[in-house]
Image (cartoon, rainbow, N blue to C red):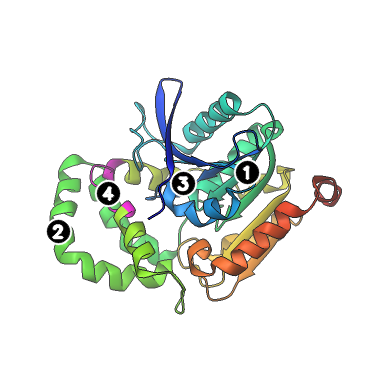
Amino acid sequence: MTVYKKVVYKINNQEIHAREEGPPNARIALMIHGWGSSWFAVSPVFNQMKERYRCIAVDLPGYGESPRLTTRTTIPTYIDLVISLLKEISKQPVILVGHSMGGMISLGVSLKAPELVERMVLLCPTISGRLSLFINMFMTPFVVMERFPAGGLIVSLLEPQMLNLTDSILRPALFADRSGITREEYEKIRADARRPGQGSVRAECFWAMRQHDIRDRLKNVKTPSLVIWGMEDNTVPLRDAGVVAREWPDADLRVIPNAGHWPQFETPDITERHIRAFLSTPLKLLTVQF
């Protein structure tokens, strides 16, 4: 089992737990996971990039090992916290890697503080803030219950009996039919999604994403960006990829077959090739394009 270096940053009195690897003086690649996840969600990209970059994969407040915020969780609060973190840890622009909600946060950082970001890699980013109809129909009752301590307790008590049911229903929404994700990886992702004590944060983020629609702001993104989407993503639907193609034509949009919402796990080789090609392109060429 790979052992990663654990670090803890304290930003504005908020602890942010993270995993860090790579040359200490190299350019920083900051990696941000999505809803109901932890740093593990970006671990395949972390492993691909750590030889060349100082990779830092964070647990957002309220997820993984990071304590939750002292105030209600919102996307703008996460964005401001990431900006403060970047100012603390780097004197030069960084590479942002964001998955799902982490992609939405990365875009917000780029829009608010573009001078801090050299380029971005976005994996199935949340754009409209609205997940697929299937996810909304299935998850909304659980999310509503988890907003309150008593409801969260009921969900946790029922979950052992419902685990097989939720697996059979949710797995097709998360992964492609011929997904290449391993059972071990799947179990870790599932464990992160149901980590005890994080129900209220999951509920707050579910609604926070819906309140942070950035479709009309994509045209203002000037940071060179690679956007990767799984063709069978039934969590953040391909209609959001269509929005990227229409509203942000300068983005390098790649749609990968046989991948769902987790292309970094499902099709790691082709995902890595796209990321390596993008990161190997001189910034001058990318900025000419943009």
Q: Earlier in the sequence, mark 1 or mark 2?
A: 1
Say which residue label 4 marks: 195
Distance in Å between CA atoms under marks 1 and 3: 30 Å
Under circle 4, the secondary element is: loop
Mark nearer the viewer, 4 or 3: 4
Asked if residue 92 lies in the magenta stretch, the reply is no
Front one among 52 and 56: 52
The kind of residue tagged 4 is: Arg
- Can you see residue 128? no
Q: Earlier in the sequence, mark 4 or mark 3?
A: 4
Q: State the mark number for residue 209.
A: 3
Distance in Å between CA atoms under marks 4 and 3: 20 Å
Q: Earlier in the sequence, mark 4 or mark 1?
A: 1
Residue visible at 71% across and 52% down?
Answer: 279
Looking at the image, residue 206 sits to the left or right of residue 119; the answer is left
Question: Which percent across, then down, holds residue 59?
Answer: 42, 40
The kind of residue tagged 2 is: Leu
Question: Which percent across, then down, holds residue 49?
Answer: 60, 51
Question: Which percent across, then down, holds residue 100?
Answer: 50, 53
Q: What range is drawn magenta here?
A: 192-200
Q: State the mark number for residue 158.
A: 2
Under circle 2, the secondary element is: helix
Q: Label 4: how many residues lie within 10 Å, few (<14), some (14-19) or many (20+)? A: some
